Amino acid sequence: MELVKVIRAERTMPITTAGLAAATDSGEVVTVRGMAHALRDFGGVRFVVLRRHDGVTQVVLPEDARMPKEGDAVEFTGVVVSEPRAPGGFELRAGTIRVLSTPAEPMPVPIHKTNMGLTLDTDLSLRPITLRNLRARAVMKLREGLARGFRDSLAARGFTEIHTPKLEALSAEGGASVFRVPYFQHKAVLAQSPQFYKQMMVGVFERVYEVGPVFRAEKHNSSRHLNEYTSLDLEMGFIDSVEDVMACETYALRYMMDLLRGEYAPQLDALKLTVPEIDGIPALRFDEAKARAAETYNLPRGDPNDLTPEEEQAIGRYAAEKLGSEFVFVTRYPSKKRPVYAMDDPDDPRLTLSFDLLFRGMEITTGGQRVHDYHAQVSKIIGRGLDPAGFEHYLMIHKHGMPPHGGLGMGLERLLKQLTGAANIRQACLFPRDTTRLSP
Amino acid sequence: MELVKVIRAERTMPITTAGLAAATDSGEVVTVRGMAHALRDFGGVRFVVLRRHDGVTQVVLPEDARMPKEGDAVEFTGVVVSEPRAPGGFELRAGTIRVLSTPAEPMPVPIHKTNMGLTLDTDLSLRPITLRNLRARAVMKLREGLARGFRDSLAARGFTEIHTPKLEALSAEGGASVFRVPYFQHKAVLAQSPQFYKQMMVGVFERVYEVGPVFRAEKHNSSRHLNEYTSLDLEMGFIDSVEDVMACETYALRYMMDLLRGEYAPQLDALKLTVPEIDGIPALRFDEAKARAAETYNLPRGDPNDLTPEEEQAIGRYAAEKLGSEFVFVTRYPSKKRPVYAMDDPDDPRLTLSFDLLFRGMEITTGGQRVHDYHAQVSKIIGRGLDPAGFEHYLMIHKHGMPPHGGLGMGLERLLKQLTGAANIRQACLFPRDTTRLSP
């Protein structure tokens, strides 16, 4: 018996769809493994559609073989031949089949159908298997592409990736929308955003980003809210104005959309999606955007300090119809509705040097320039009736030197929802969390 | 006044260190921004060492300029000239200086020194500014490299990135080491690992990975434990044996180390680190490893089902001295100490098809093959005295078809600690969480 074995770097890499395409009509014998996703029996010819890591492969069964069951893990060996009606234009003519595992019970829902015909609630309750549906899977693959594009675009511009803590001390600004966590002898909360930490890290790396979970204990159970979501955050130092942050977002989004177009075409095709072309993104001041939405679409003007979902929709429509863009920045939000770290507009301190980004009529990003001067930040904290002592660690960076800086947070699920045209944000999340749903 | 402005993609990209090197002795006038990190006054010549996004730059002050303060955000314009004694072999001879912001108080600790001379506790309490120290910053940049290398290596092998929820329903296997979170009308816990979710996602994408936080409410306050850490997780389907998972880890680690050597050389140099060369990684069975550690180093044999930290150190030493490797796999752990989803060894069901990976004498990974058969998994749950009803969503995947699969979780902080030779794991984390520390 061999007592010391040496493990070499990965030996097994499953053949890719591109590899199968390259082997087409070559006569080369290949081995393909996957899950029996759909079964078709046309009397004389029987097919298995295999669900594989990077796509689906049509396999023609050997004549004498038993038809596998839906959900079997199977291995086929055979040759790849052209077949214009098959996915990718080829199919595997299998010589042998080997069943590697088999399910205990039949699939309870038709995951092999384009449209499973399920209510959202059933879909979510059966999520471990409904995600196997090819449309659901394509949405989640695009999700990967967006996260990856965000990271890669920023890494190419001198940003450093950070991982900030999700458990924090219960702080002064706490509020009702934080989840509280008993933490040994202390009280912790779950991070609602990496805001303070990413600002701290601007002092270290100048430009930073993070892709990670954030937690909001908000009670609204709407089609656009989740209680846990993935936030795409960036923060950058040495900005000349808040427009540098907006320009960086324009750049990152363009990069992300180009990446999807370039490397996620099978998923976009499966979902029949068109990815926006981003050249520039128009920006309207808050008051101006509100006025134009009201005038153009006869909307009532609600809260003078915020936008309602209906106003966001109208501004999105205005941008699409009048400005030729599916994205639109809304700038100079009133200070009243912006957080304590937002920098006020020196021309009008009732406003902030901040922005939201709307995509197809829904807010997907909040960002802005931050206060970097120690005394200005302390004043603003006191002005809000808060105690600077509660911000001790945060104020350390202002006290000992911070460059002018700003940043933003983008909700990955909101971006994906709008991109895929999903009716509900839960469809843009693997295992969504809402006020009543904690599992699966 | 311009009412609609169009924001174009990023206009500002700070000049890189490579860009400065390229401009050296060209006479080209460049603008450089950064934080005044260290100040040196040699009477006639005064220098500022600027801390910038991708390195440090030595600047010679204009003769008539006032010396900036440590922590000032400054902008210099000038020409780059060769200077062998300066970082990178060049310095900026500044013609103009502009101070963009200035700190309210002087730096309380010597962050500009190679060794700050602080106790760990002081270092961590002042973390927002002590991370500005160049050694601390280099460690955190390597952290980025490891996370990036893990992702990139797997993406190149057909893996899909996933983001699984960190809030979960309180479940049967809960136990003492989970953080509990009141969640509206329900009871939630913080995820200790993405284990069940990544297995679910193998049914969808075949090969998946996640880089994300995990939470352990363990009470030990040691140099190798954190209560929140970043886990590098992968899970892969259609394996022939657990060795496919080990081979994949060998591949990923080799990729990560090569990436550091290739793209993080300045950080490695700053820390005077040597990155291990990985060809293959030796593997020893648990019982064999335990015996050799005991025999070679006269260690008492403790718990027959687990390894003590001392045994891990001895096995690591054995691997380095006798097998020529800083990494070593330990395989076939006893079933008693492995979780309910671990696949038992068909040759000896007291053992599992599992492994740990030790790096320089410390466990950095736990992995193994998982049960994929529904009936086998139900039996194993019952055999542990647990109720299968508590595993309803998890068992859905086994019930409706799963390929043979396995995976692993690697602790990013442990890997980074061992790589950098840090005495304490807290030095491998931006803002560590332990039983008493929740801030900064």
Image (cartoon, coloured by chain):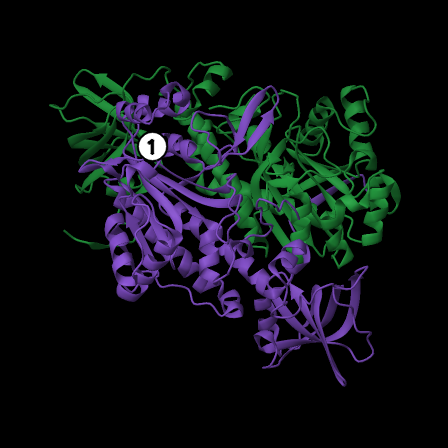
Chain colours: A green, B purple
Q: Is residue A130 above or below residue A406?
A: above
Q: Residue at x 62, y 79 (%)?
A: B25
Res B328 → quadrant? bottom left
Between A182 and A286, the residue placed more toward the observer is A182
Residue on which the image places disc 1: B341
**x, y percent for residue B67:** 79, 73
Q: How many discs mark residues in the rendered view? A: 1
Between B236 and A134, the residue placed more toward the observer is B236
The quarter of the rendered structure image containing the N terminus of chain B is top right
Decide if residue B237 is on the left or right side of residue A396.
Answer: left
Q: Is residue A438 above or below residue A392?
A: above
**x, y percent for residue A374:** 81, 53
Decide if residue B26 is on the left or right side of residue A312.
Answer: left
**x, y percent for residue A387:** 82, 42
Q: Residues within 10 Å of mark 1 (few under 14, many from 20)?
A: some
Subunit of label 1: B
Query: Residue extending furthest front?
Result: B300
What kind of residue is marked 1?
Answer: Tyr
Query: Residue extending furthest bottom?
Result: B44
**x, y percent for residue B432:** 58, 49
Q: Is residue B8 visible?
A: no
Q: Residue at x 81, y 45 (%)?
A: A388
Q: For numbered disc 1, what is the local secondary structure?
A: loop
Decide if residue B248 is on the left or right side of residue A154.
Answer: left
Q: Residue at x 44, y 26 (%)?
A: A136
Q: Is residue A331 above or below residue A238?
A: above
Q: Residue at x 61, y 73 (%)?
A: B23
